[in-house]
Amino acid sequence: MTDAPDRGSGSRQLQVEAHGLDVIGDAERKGTPRTLFWPWFGANVSILGLSYGSFALGFGISFWQALAAGVIGIVFSFLLCGFVAVAGKRGSAPTMVLSRAAYGVRGNRLPSVVSWMLTVGWETVLTALATMATATVLDRLGWGGGTGTKVVALIVVGALVVVGGVMGFDLIMRLQTVITVVTGVLTVVYIGLVADHIHWSAVSAVPSGSAQEFIGALVFMMTGFGLGWVNAAADYSRYLPRDSSGRGVVGWTTFGASVAPLLLLVFGLLLAGSSTTLNTAIAADPIGALTTILPTWFLIPFAAVAVLGLVGGAVLDIYSSGLALLAAGLRVPRYLAALLDGVLMIAGSIYIVFLTDDFLGQFIGFLTTLGVPVAAWCGVMLADLALRRRDYDEADLFRPRGRYGDVEPLPLVLTLAATAIGWGLVTNTAASWLEWQGYLLGPLGLGGKDGSWAYANLGVLAALALGFLGTLALGRGRVRTQEAGPPSRPLDVREVPGA
């Protein structure tokens, strides 16, 4: 197998990453937990974070309630990512391969498919937003913002994302470092330019909402941030040495991913709370609406920061979606899986940009619906990881007859049950194709689909708790049996599809 690029040399010629699902060898693992800051910060410094201020206030809560929901939701959900990232350095394989230890080698295909759907969905949303933002900026400059402009913007943005995903880890790490610096600086400039649009009197006058509305906003923040990344959290930590600090992995992942969204959320809340017009416009065009309060001379830099920030997130998503597709059973090289996902991403972006005019409703429906099974998987994965006292037997992660088995019934039943309960406790009336959800709100005495608990999205929290507590209570014996066996024979690369 071709050696992976040397990440310690910035001058090393870039090449397509040869690794797919295979385990990263000790000789190729370099760096420290601190290096995780760059990909996580670069993926979450997107100007989209400002729009989440408007999204949060849309739940009918006050500035202080939205701030609390955002801080708790963002930090807690990215802390979950940090814990999952520890599995990467303990097992040196992609996230959706490591969860085979819980689900079995082929039983893990179900959560892998869900993970693939989530990451493809996210990369599609980010690409569509970058396209719409570019068209809005060019329209304000008088250079045209119609269909032709959107087509060109989509081609350029899509090409950047696909190239990053196909090239793989080495280019992504370098790209995220550049994105971090450029978007960080330009975002600070943006904040300075629009600060005079903040009116605290209007912000403080926004009325408080109910506890149910607060919980709904909190869950939305969790699904919009950390729970959207948790299924990919070990994809980058797997390149760290085995003896890397577990606390360092958790800390740098959580800090790198959280710091930018927290700062952007605060400013986004202040902007949205100051103007009902801006608040309404963000729902239709979350990025482009932010240009309406900018001086003309900064529109081009704004386009750069918006596109780079969104591309940074989309690149990580397309890389991880390719790995998830391989884990689901597709037998092709990693770069071809990423390329296939890129085609689907472009098709989905075309739908969002050209065929729909209700972005926010569809977006919330997408996040909540897939957030439920991903939360269930996350609970199972974290409990399984907590029960383990030894590193993963990496070779058996690829052998259906190995210690981790072929199909493990318990985690699959827990995931399906938690998902069924979770979907019964969420509603998505803005997306007509999801009106079937919420079927447990009435029978459980929570007021039905029109009651006060209808938009609290309790299903995400319920799925996370059921997956975690169920595995913790019932999975201990299975884990001890797995860890009692002797080390397996070394892995042959021919046993790893997509390597």
Image (tube, rainbow, N blue to C red):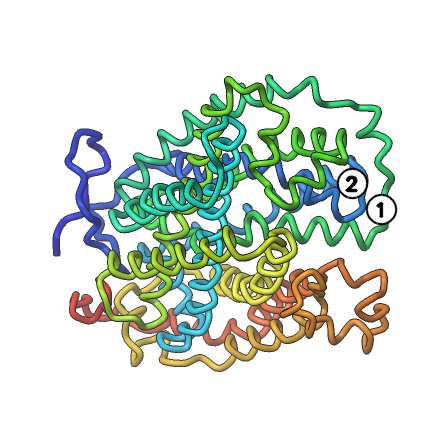
Q: Residue at x 42, y 63 (%)?
A: 116
**Residue 247 shows up from this direction:** no
Residue 14 at x, y = what percent? 18, 39
**SS of the residue under disc 1:** loop
Q: Residue 65 — which label?
A: 2
Residue 205 at x, y = what percent? 86, 32
- Residue 357 located left or right of residue 34: right
Task: Give the residue number, with chain letter if any, for mark 1.
Answer: 209
Q: Residue at x 24, y 65 (%)?
A: 498
Give whichever of discs 2 and 1 has the lower sequence position. Answer: 2
Within 10 Å of disc 2 (Cα), the crowding (few <14, some 14-19, many 20+) is many
Do residues under tags 2 and 1 come within 8 Å of each other at their CB atoms? yes
The quadrant of the image that shows the C terminus is bottom left
Q: Residue 29 — which label?
A: none
Task: Name the amino acid type tagged 1.
Answer: Gly
Q: Give the number of the mark in front: 2 or 1.
A: 1
Q: Residue at x 17, y 65 (%)?
A: 493
Residue 425 at x, y = what percent? 72, 68
**Residue 77 shows up from this direction:** yes
Task: Name the amino acid type tagged 2.
Answer: Gln
Residue 272 at x, y = what percent? 71, 34
Q: Residue at x 52, y 25 (%)?
A: 187
* Residue 227 to residue 115: above or below: above
The quadrant of the image that shows the N terminus is bottom left
